[in-house]
Structures are given as C-alpha cells and as structure tokens.
C-alpha cells in the first residue's frame, strides 16, 4: 500500500467556523487552539484584506494554533459575513472588531491585518487600546498625510479623476466592473500580478476569492469602495496608538512602494519591528511559514 502524501502548506483546508450576531448581522469567524490553555500569551485575531476572507488565513491558522489561541473573522461585507446595503468604512470595521474582541474573545488580542485589514487593525489599536495587545501589519493599506497628498493637483488630472469617480459611483457602471473582476480568469490574472511565487496561485485560492463575490449584496459592497468616507490617515492613527507594532512587507508588491511606506511608518512610529520578505501583496498566504515564524517569535517576546 502506498503511503498517503501529506498536503503542502498551500493545500491545507479551511477550518469550519461559526456565526456571531453584531448589529443585527451575521458575522462569520473561525477559531482554533482555544482549548490549549494558552492564557499566558495573547490570542491572535487575523483580519483579511479587500475581497478576501477567513479562508485567506487557513495556512496561518493551521500552524499557529499549535502555540496560540487563534481567531479569524470576516469583516462585514466580505466572506461569509452579511453584506447589507450600507456605508462601509474603517470606523465601521473598527467597531465590529472591538466588539468581537470584547464579547467573543474576552481579552486583549494581537490583531494581524493584511491590506484593508491592516488599516482596520490600526483603527482598533488607535481608538480601543483596551482591546489590543499588539499589532501586526502585512502590506497595510491607508494613506499618509504628507506633502505629496496635499499638493495642488494638476487641473486636467483632477478633472479626469473626478469624472472617473463620478462615473463609477453610478450603479450600472460599477455593477459592470464587478461582473468583470469576479470572473475566475480575471481573479487568476490579478493574483498572478500580486504574487511573486506563482505556484501559490492555486485553484483553491481562486475559488476562495470568487465564492463570496457571488453572494447577494456583494456588488453593492464593491461599489461602496468608491463612495466610502475618507477616514483618518495612517499617521493620525499612529499618533493615537501605543501598542507594540510588527510590520511584515511583501517586497514584491506591485501595488505599493514598500520601502517608501516603511520610511513613513518609521517617521511616525519608531518603536516597531519590520521585515522584508520575498513575496507580493499577501505575504501571509504566499510565504506562510516565514510569516508564521516571525509572528510567533514576536508575539512570544511581548
């Protein structure tokens, strides 16, 4: 009899989750390692980026549950969570995450966020320090309020930008764009652009991204990005934050200048640790074993 071949880290399955009620909406979450009695170390709360879900953290949960109580949550509007027709913002997700920590986890957590989830993590740490034992950012989104962002724009460029934004605010154009981007071939194309290791772009990953996009309300959530109110800039959030900070950069990210953003973070928050990894926009999914080890060592040092 041939021995079964152990699955690679890229093919580990997602764990089944549960639902929690928040503001009348179903919020999906996954937990692991909660029965290990690890009360001597903070729990971990993993927060996905735009268009992703708890599934995007399956490789990290798989390994980190050995050493920690691990939680992952679908932000309102994403994954298996409800997708109501309402205004979405960092403040909304801040309130959701804070209440989840208070009501479900029950003690301060280290919150780790990728991209949009990183910005939401900063919002929680800035405004609800009682819920946060530490912050881990992985290619975090969010603007800095620096000279470049307040400079007077070129009038023609400003007019073109405003025209595009106004057009995309209309329901039908935004719906058409959503129908395009949620197709499997376009999801695969986008992922191949933002992952350095192409072998990490599996059919399982594509399906994990595509499945929630078919839910009722998903198109409205997508459209809300274009009309979301502008929240606090990252430097303003950092000025209100006191938690330990670890930043993990996928240096091959085509969507952001990681070295420049590193300089900005250090300018506004010197008490941080950071590492640059050979990965793209989602290092936790592309090089999970490296990310898991760095997170493990840092959290245990707190």
Image (cartoon, rainbow, N blue to C red):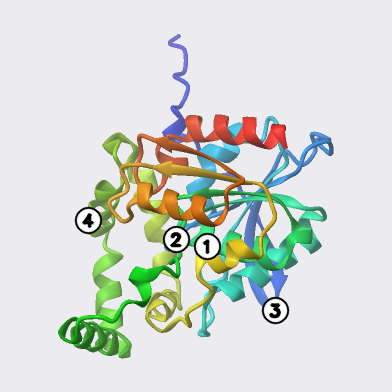
Numbered tag placed on residue 141 in the rendering: 2
What residue sits right under mark 1 in the picture?
119
SS at mark 4 in the image: helix
Precedes in sequence: disc 2 or disc 3: 3
Q: Disc 3 vs disc 4: which is toward the camera? A: 3
Distance from Cα at disc 2 to Cα at disc 3? 26 Å
Q: Disc 2 vs disc 4: which is toward the camera? A: 2
Q: From the image, which quarter does the N terminus lie in? A: top left
Distance from Cα at disc 1 to Cα at disc 2? 6 Å
Residue occupying the point 39% across, 75% down:
222
Between residue 24 and residue 39, name the one nearer to us. Answer: 39
Mark 3 surroundings: few (<14), some (14-19) or many (≥20) residues within 10 A: few
Between residue 271 and residue 119, name the one nearer to us. Answer: 271
Residue occupying the point 36% across, 72% down:
149
Q: Disc 4 vs disc 1: which is toward the camera? A: 1
SS at mark 2 in the image: loop
Instruction: Estimate the x, y position of residue 19 in percent, counting from the top left.
Output: 67, 63
SS at mark 1 in the image: helix
């Amino acid at each position: 009899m041939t021995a079964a071949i152990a699955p690679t880290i890229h093919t580990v399955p997602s764990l089944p989750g549960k639902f929690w009620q928040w503001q009348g909406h179903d919020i999906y979450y996954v937990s692991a390692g909660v029965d290990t009695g690890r009360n001597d170390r903070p729990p971990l709360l993993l927060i996905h980026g735009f268009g992703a879900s708890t599934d995007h953290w399956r490789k990290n949960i798989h390994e980190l549950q050995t050493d920690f109580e691990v939680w992952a949550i679908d932000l309102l509007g994403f994954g298996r969570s409800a997708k109501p027709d309402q205004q979405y913002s960092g403040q909304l997700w801040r309130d959701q995450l804070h209440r989840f920590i208070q009501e479900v986890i029950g003690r301060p957590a280290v919150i780790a966020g990728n991209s949009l989830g990183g910005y939401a993590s900063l919002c929680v740490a800035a405004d609800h320090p009682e819920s946060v034992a530490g912050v881990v950012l992985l290619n975090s989104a969010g603007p800095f309020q620096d000279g470049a962002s307040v400079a007077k724009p070129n009038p023609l460029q400003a007019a073109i930008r405003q025209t595009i934004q106004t057009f995309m605010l209309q329901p039908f154009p935004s719906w058409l764009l959503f129908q395009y981007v949620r197709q499997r071939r376009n999801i695969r194309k986008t992922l191949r652009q933002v992952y350095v290791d192409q072998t990490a772009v599996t059919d399982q990953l594509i399906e994990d991204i595509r499945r929630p996009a078919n839910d009722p309300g998903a198109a409205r959530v997508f459209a809300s990005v274009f009309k979301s109110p502008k929240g606090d800039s990252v430097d303003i959030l950092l000025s209100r934050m006191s938690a330990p900070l670890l930043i993990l950069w996928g240096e091959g990210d085509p969507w952001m200048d990681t070295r420049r953003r590193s300089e900005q973070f250090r300018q506004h928050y010197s008490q941080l640790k950071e590492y640059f990894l050979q990965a793209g926009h989602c290092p936790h999914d592309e090089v999970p074993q490296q990310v898991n080890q760095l997170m493990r060592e840092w959290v245990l040092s707190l």
